[in-house]
Amino acid sequence: MKNWKYILLALILFPFAGMVSSCSEDSGEEEEFDNWQNRNDVVTAEWAGSSMKKIICYSKNTTISGNVADYIYVEVLESGTGIETPLFTDTCRLAYRGRLIPSKSYPEGYVFDQSYLGDFNWNTIDVARDENGRDKVCQDFAPGFTTALMNMHIGDRWRVYIPYQLGYGSLAKPTCSYSNLIFDVALVDFWHPGEHRPVFKSR
């Protein structure tokens, strides 16, 4: 009679076993993330060879050409206004949706994080918050994401392609090691340390 608890637990946990094992580089049958690092390297090379705008990471030497993983690649979806861009220490009010590169079960890329649901709409979006419910600081993000913010103007909406070297590298974040990141990012506002803005409320 006691065994039914273990059987029930096994049935609940079984579906998650595939996700845990799918990060393996040596699996015999095709899995979601097989050869993941190599697949992401190939995609980075494709981004570098495309006509997308490329921006070298803020932490790299901008006077010399870097390798393909020293850059983020950008599609401009909407252009904002103004000439100022956020500084490393500025607070940014933004909305985003983050995906991985396409895989077997996710042809559009697995969505691992987002600040809004449904289609993007400036009037109804929710903005990103930290764990204390505050707007985020530019430097709080992965280097590639911070690089994008430091080049955006208020009202810009970009699709940003970030090589894993400028994301989370070999860390198993957001789901697997060596994951390139693709973010749709909209910059709503930003301000310098010591300045403040009213709490954001979507309409």
Image: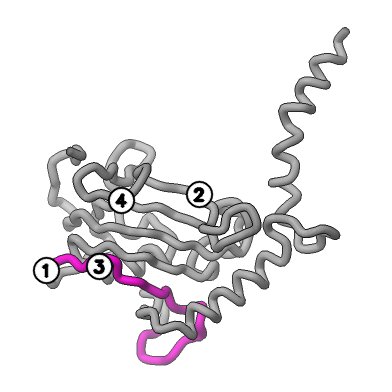
Where does label 4 land, which residue?
A: 120
* Residue 82 badge: 1
Q: Earlier in the sequence, mark 1 or mark 3?
A: 1
Q: Circle 2 — which element? A: strand
**Observer-nearest of 82 and 134:** 82
User: Is residue 199 a member of the stretch shown in magenta?
Assistant: no
Position above or below: 21 against 199? below
Q: Earlier in the sequence, mark 4 or mark 2?
A: 2
Contact between labelled residues 2 and 4, with CB atoms less than 8 Å apart: no
**Cα gap from disc 4 to disc 2, whole angstroms:** 16 Å
Q: Circle 1 — which element? A: loop
Residue type, mark 3 in image:
Met
**Cα gap from disc 2 to disc 1, whole angstroms:** 31 Å
Where does label 3 land, which residue?
A: 152
The boundaries of the magenta stretch are 61-81
User: How was the colour assigned to the protein in this rendering?
Assistant: one colour
